[in-house]
Amino acid sequence: MAQLPEISIAFIVSALLTLFDLDRTFYVPSNAERKAVLYAWWWGFILANGLISAALYAIFGDASSLKPIDPRLRAAMFGAAYQALIRLKFTTFTLQGQEVPFGLEAFYEGVKNFVYKRINRIAKAARYDETIQMAGASTLAQLISRARISINQDAIMTPDQKRAALTWLVSVVQDAGTQDDDKRAAIADFILSGQRVQ
């Protein structure tokens, strides 16, 4: 029978992977309104994923084919692979003459989309406010200089990514069809979130 330490490992690994996915997907300014609601969705989704992984490990972790694997490694594998397990099809049934696979994937994706939409709505509103505030408080020249410095000092960007970001910056500045207010907003958004408006 699965032991609590191994169940905890499965929980922690899947919770961390969910946190990493949320952090990669959303930029949320620190001054976001409705932060309590945002945190409830954010941490609730992390907790739910951890619990799903822990439950799957508790149910399937002692399968005979997995017995030779060290229990801690087995638990970490469940934590890392729980989403693949969710996507397994339990059975198929016939609907209007066609085989329809049945599993938890549709339910899980529906819940994930539901949560992500709510987080995104709060994050977008906060990003808009933060971007407009920075764009309004700086000249275009100040924003260009800050963006260029930000790109050059970024320790995570590869040289190719830096070149692409600098090329994007030049294209925004030289776009004759875009007003300065929009240029300032696009550059401010890039400085704050790292995302480039196309």
Image (cartoon, grey):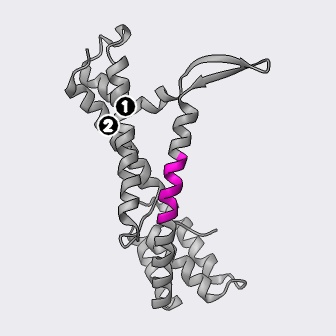
Residue pushed farthest right? 97
Q: Does the magenta segment cover residue 120?
A: yes
Q: Secondary structure at mark 2?
A: helix
Q: Secondary structure at mark 1?
A: helix
> Can residue 162 be seen in this snapshot?
no
Badge 2 amino acid: Val
Give the residue at mark 2.
13
Q: Does the magenta segment cover residue 197?
A: no
Q: Position of residue 71 (x, y in %)?
A: 25, 20
**Could you tell me if the residues under marks 2 and 1 are in contact, i.e. CB atoms within 8 Å?**
yes
Q: Picture quarter containing residue 13?
A: top left
Q: Residue at x 67, y 17 (%)?
A: 93
Q: Picture quarter containing residue 168?
A: bottom right
Q: Is residue 106 above or below residue 39?
A: above
Q: Is residue 12 above or below residue 190?
A: above
Q: Residue at x 35, y 27 (%)?
A: 55
Give the residue at mark 1.
53
Magenta segment, principal secondary structure?
Answer: helix
Q: Quadrant of the N terminus?
A: top left
Q: Picture quarter containing residue 57?
A: top left
In the image shown, does 67 or 127 lie closer to the viewer? Answer: 127
Within 10 Å of disc 2 (Cα), the crowding (few <14, some 14-19, many 20+) is many
Q: Residue at x 37, y 45 (%)?
A: 46
Q: Position of residue 165 (x, y in %)?
A: 53, 68
Q: Quadrant of the C terminus?
A: bottom right
Q: Position of residue 133 (x, y in %)?
A: 46, 84
The answer to which of marks 2 and 1 sits earlier in the sequence is 2
Going by the image, does 54 lie left or right of 159?
A: left
The residue segment tinted magenta is: 113-122
Within 10 Å of disc 1 (Cα), the crowding (few <14, some 14-19, many 20+) is many
Q: Position of residue 158 (x, y in %)?
A: 45, 58
Residue pushed farthest top? 64
